[in-house]
Structures are given as C-alpha cells and as structure tokens.
Image (cartoon, rainbow, N blue to C red):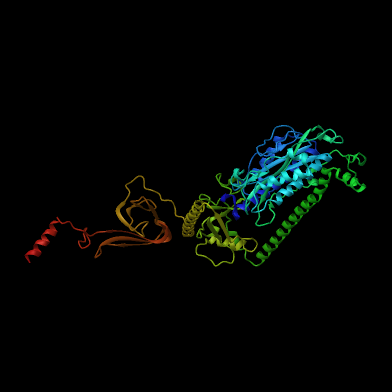
Amino acid sequence: MALSVKDGHALATFRKAAVVTHKILKHSFVRLLEDAFDQAKSITHEEIATHVDECCEHPSKVNIKSPQGHYESCYFPIVQSGGKYDIRPSASTNGETLSDDVIIISLGVRYNFHCANMARTFFVDPVESVRLNYSILLELRRECLAVMLAGRCVGSVAETANSFIRQRCPHLLKFLPKNFGFGLGLDFRESSLIMNAKNQRKFAQNMVFNLAIGFHDLELTDMQKADAQGSIRKLSKYSMLIADTVLIQSGDEPPDIVTKHSVEWKDVSYFINEKNDKDIMPPQGNHYTPEQVESQSAIMSSRLRERSKACAPDRSSLARNEKQAELMQQKLSVKRSEKSSAWSQQGQLSSRADILEVDVYQSGGEYPRDLPSTEVYVDMQGQVLFAPINGSQVPFHISMIKNAVQPDPDRTATYLRLNFFTPGQTASKDIAPATSKLIEQHGHNSMFIKEMLYRSRESQRLTAAHRMIQELRKRFRQHAAKAAEEADLIPQEKLVKMRDQRIPRMADLTMRPFISGKKTTGTLEAHTNGLRFTSKKHEIVDIMYGNIKHSLFQPCENEVMVLIHFYLKNPVLVGRKKSQNVQFLTEVVDASVALDSARRSMYDPDELDEEQRERQD
C-alpha cells in the first residue's frame, strides 16, 4: 500500500507519460481516422493499432522531441468498431476493416516504468439516442470524479456510479461494468486497487488511478436508427468508453486529470453523410424550438470539412515560421560577412591562414557504430567526446575541454561537469596553441558552450566516462608537447649504412643525455654519412656528419673516463626532448666496490680477518 503513494519524481514521470499519450491520440490516431474518412480509404483495426504502437515507441513520428528508448507502449493499442466491442482492459484488436459507426480506441504509454492510459469513443453519423446516452456517460464520469477524494473508499466510485444510474436511467444499469478502473504504478494494473464495490481501501494523496467509465453492448433498435445515415444503420449493439489517468489531490481538492484530450460531444462526433434541415425531425415526445433545429442542422455539417478549414491557419502559420527562419538565416549570413570584412580591415587575418581547423568526421555517417544515444561517449581513436544534447549526440574535440570534474554524488545520482575553453578566459597552461588560435579566430562571430552538467542514477557510467576523458586529455597533452618539441626540428638526411666493409663499432658506451631511464648504454657505429647509436633497449639515435658543428675529444689523462662530445648545427630528438649537445663516454679505471654501502655476508673471509685483528688488539 505504501508503494501506491507516489513521490514527486514518480508523479512527474506519470505526467510526461500522460502528455505523450494525449499527443499520440490527437496527432496520430485522430488524423489517421479523419484521413480514412475523408479519402474513403479502407484500413483495418490492426493497421491503425500498429501505427499508433510505432508512435508510442518512437514519439518523434508525431513531432515529440524525446530521447529514443525512453518511451514504450504499455500494451498493443485496442481499436474496435463495427458492432464487436469489449471495454475490459484485456480486450484485443482484431484484423477487421474499420467501420464508420462507433469507434473505441484505448492506448497507454510507459515512461521510466510508469504508465499513463486513456480511452476515447468516436461517433460517425450518430443518431439521437447515441448522443443522449453519451451525455449520460459524461454526467456519470463527473459524479465518479467527485468522489475520488483523499480519505474516501476506493469502492465508493462503483457505489456512486450504480446509485446515479439507478436513479437517472434504470434501464442502463445492466450495461454498466463491474469495475470502473484500477490503480497505476510500476505494474500497469495494480490488483489491490481495482475500483469495484468490494474494495474498502482508501484514496490517498498522490495516488494514481485509471478511471474507466463506459456502457457495454447498448441496444440500438430499428426505431432509434430510422433516420440514421451511414454504417451505423447496420449496428444492433454498440458500446462506449472513456478512460483517463487521474491523480488524487490533498483534502477536498478534485482529482487532476492528466490525459487532457477532450470528451465533449462536438470533439468526438463526425457527420459525414449530411442531411437537409427538413430531414431532421425530433423524436417522439420531444419538441425542438426553431433555434434548436437550426443548431442541429449546423452540427450536422461535415466535421471533416470544418477541421480542414481549421487546419488552414495552422498551415499558413507554419509557412510563415519557415519564411521567418529563412530570413533570419540570411540576416545572420550578412552579419557574419560584415564582421569578417571588418576583421580583415583591422589587419588581423595574417595568422589565420596558418590555423588548421579540427576536422575529425566528414559526416555523421563516420561516427562510431556503437555510439549510444543518451550516454557520454569517448572516442579514443578520434580524440572526440560525444555529449548528448536534446536527444542528439554532439561531438567535441578533446582540445576544447578545459577540465572534467565529478562533484560529490548525492543519494540518488552521480554528476559529471564538463568545462570548455571559451573566449575571454585567462589563458591556461593546458590549452594547446592551435586551440587558442581557433578560439581567437572564431570568438568574434560564434557562440561557445562554457559548461555542461550531466546527472545519472548509474554511477559506473559517468565514472568510466570521467576516467576516459582524463586519460584522453593526458594523451592529447603528451602528443601536443611532442609536436611542439618537433615543430622546429629540421629533418635529417637518411643514414647510409656500410655494406661492403667492416663497420667501425665501439661497444658499452654511455650516451648523454639519456634516451630513457637513469642511464643509457649501447653501441656506437660509424657509417657512410653519419653515426648511429643503438641502446640495449634497441633505441636508435642517428647523427649525420654534416650536422656536426664542433666535436671534442677528452682523453683519459688524469681522468676516469674518455669521451667524445658533439655540438650540432641543428638539434636532434633524443628520447622526448631536443638536444644540440650529445656525448658518448666510457670509464677506463678498474672496477671497484664501495664496501661501506654494500651488504657483506657473515662468512666473508675479509670480514672474518677484520674481526680477528680487532680481538688481538
């Protein structure tokens, strides 16, 4: 029972699901229905339900912007017409052709495990008795909503419905269903919150219910359809159903209906086969005034024609908006060209020719194939961060990211903040020179994103993304530092090895500066046009004879080592750094051992002799 009362997050989720449900009914089912009547197309119940189900799975088909995969259908939509009706939640859609008489549609959308449900009945060329029964159904719906208050019994809805029909229209009592809805939660149908006369549970604030009011298998006599037009003349029985998602409010506040689609007669009735005013005769026992007859004849005009006229302003408004957007783009282009010309007049375009634009992907088709739509993704190979914005992945080169920070998580979620380099900021030591030039170039006519914050309930995803961003930034800085070191290096000629004679070689030489580690030892070889040093780790440094400006030789006179020193015309890359001075040396004294720092064994003869002398003294 405690889970039946929803928190604020769950209520917001229900409202989002209800909005999507309403829009799919309005922009998918109703339009498909009107097109079928207007163009006299033959379409089956199953085809309509399949189309509506696809819109539930992909709301973008009805111009609802949402990330793909967040919405899904609670059940396969139920479409019924032609005299075969079932208003229970367990009903199913058959494959028969849609009939233009009484049409019932039921659909539900699930968003983040919470469902919203609604059902509507549409009437095509209805007779007067159908309209009267529908008006009674609307009154019954209002009575049921009036008792759905916090503190009242769930079973009071069924008791109120039966009491109302027993007093107003006793002949309709047998057509009432036993259940008038159910509670909604993580399960589409909460079995403990079914709204029947036996349920003694209480309504509570922030509970969510599906209120379903209807009549099943109402009889339609020949006398009632004597003046009927269209397919409704073939009906002997029909049903009607209205279902909505309802939120229980606090105290005596009326419940909130979150599925907002209209239930008024003028919005659910269609008159395709028009009749003249003289054909509209009041039924027996009723007398209409001339004003009522005139009103009836106005209602009998084609609903489809009226709706097409109503859509005309929408089309003109859409065309106007498109034209305004086109004019805006033209003005922006003119402004950009003016600023570019002003920029050139100031003489600041001299360095722009040397700036290379970052161009990793030529088109969206080159994006990684496993790119998720709603997650922060790092392409290590392309050095690109993909950040989801409004359901679309937007690529950012790693050079534009100033830093990535993970604030302290709260109880329910983990956060990731991305800060970007933007114009006007103090120059950072981490920014690459090319990035700084690009920002300077585009800063006067472009908009920049300064910061983005992402929130996720799964901490592992954002933590992994943060770790990969940090690793990619480290690699990029190292690559940029290496490129900066090599930027002014002059390429050397290729070493020509000696083939037909013995190669002069000196082994066990130490090279300075070290290529890697604390010491670099290897072999120095003399070839046709230069020297090659190969370390024991197979690291190679080539020194061309033509690149040597000065060479110094230090003999071993009064020295412990002999060395050769080269001062180069142009620096060469030794390890990761440039160097213009290179030494090769070797020690010439006998090997010695520092006894003070070495560990000695207790069985060392020298140690034993020393102890013996100390005892004699």
**Residue 335 placement, left or right of 290:** left
- Residue 386 in the image: above or below residue 348: above
- Of residues 522 and 315, the one nearer the viewer is 315
Q: How many marks?
A: 0
Q: Position of residue 482 (x, y in %)?
A: 46, 57
Q: Is residue 181 left or right of residue 438?
A: right
Residue 123 coordinates in the image, percent (x, y): 79, 40
Q: Is residue 75 visible?
A: yes
Locate residue 536 relative to residue 179 in the image: left or right.
left
Looking at the picture, does residue 273 appear above or below residue 380? Answer: above
Please tell me which residue lies in front, 287 or 34: 287
Which corner quadrant holds the C terminus? bottom left
Residue at the image point whose x is 79% and y is 37% from the top: 101
Estimate the x, y position of residue 561 in percent, counting from the top left.
27, 61
Q: Residue at x 12, y 58 (%)?
A: 608
Out of 436 and 77, give the one closest to the viewer: 77
Instruction: Give coordinates of residue 584: x percent, y percent.
Output: 33, 58
